[in-house]
Amino acid sequence: MKRYSVTVNGNVYDVVVEEVAADASAPVAPVAAPVAAPVKAAPAAAPAAPVNATGTKVNAPMPGTVLKMKVNVGDAVKRGDVVCVLEAMKMENEITAPVDGKVSFAAAQGTSVKTGDLLVSIG
């Protein structure tokens, strides 16, 4: 018997699979292994709450993970500068600044975001 940990739709399951010897003369029948109750996965890190996030807000255009933050609070950016890289569906998407200004809020690298979540505020 082999034991595996399988993740399906965010739920982690411990499964046990029985190995059956392959015999050409014996009929093959499916073998179902009992499945344990889902193991509670560790909660994802919550995005940092914006404190005094004023100015032009740059929101996530899609759900994903902040792979790289290219700016920090206090950095000056120009329109078109890449402020962060958002990973969604195994693709890296560069998020750019819509205006010139100073960054007053920046999400943390590694944060999971939903569509519309605040990534950067430029004032």
Image: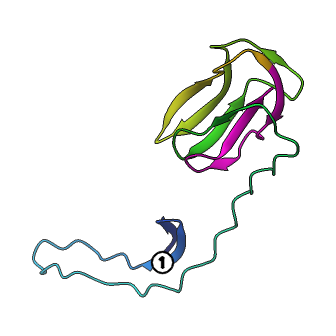
Please state which amino acid type lies under the numbered disc 1: Val
Which of the 4 image quadrants contains residue 84? top right
Q: Which residues are magenta?
A: 102-123
Residue, x 48% and y 38% (percent of image)?
90
**In magenta stretch: residue 121:** yes
Could you say where residue 4 lies in the image, as x and y percent from the top left? 51, 70
Which of the 4 image quadrants contains residue 66? top right
> How many numbered markers are drawn?
1
Which of the 4 image quadrants contains residue 19? bottom left
Nearest to the observer: residue 14 or residue 21: 14
- Residue under label 1, please give it: 15
Residue 121 in view in this figure: yes
Could you say where residue 45 lies in the image, as x and y percent from the top left? 74, 56
Is 1 on the left-hand or right-hand side of 82?
left
The image shows residue 5, relative to residue 105, as above or below, that is below
**In magenta stretch: residue 83:** no
Is 38 on the left-hand or right-hand side of 26?
right
Residue 1 in view in this figure: no
The image shows residue 71, relative to residue 14, as above or below, that is above
Residue, x 30% and y 77% (percent of image)?
20
Q: Which residue is outermost to the front?
A: 55
Residue, x 56% and y 45% (percent of image)?
64
Nearest to the observer: residue 51 or residue 8: 51
Which corner quadrant holds the N terminus?
Answer: bottom left
Residue, x 87% and y 29% (percent of image)?
73
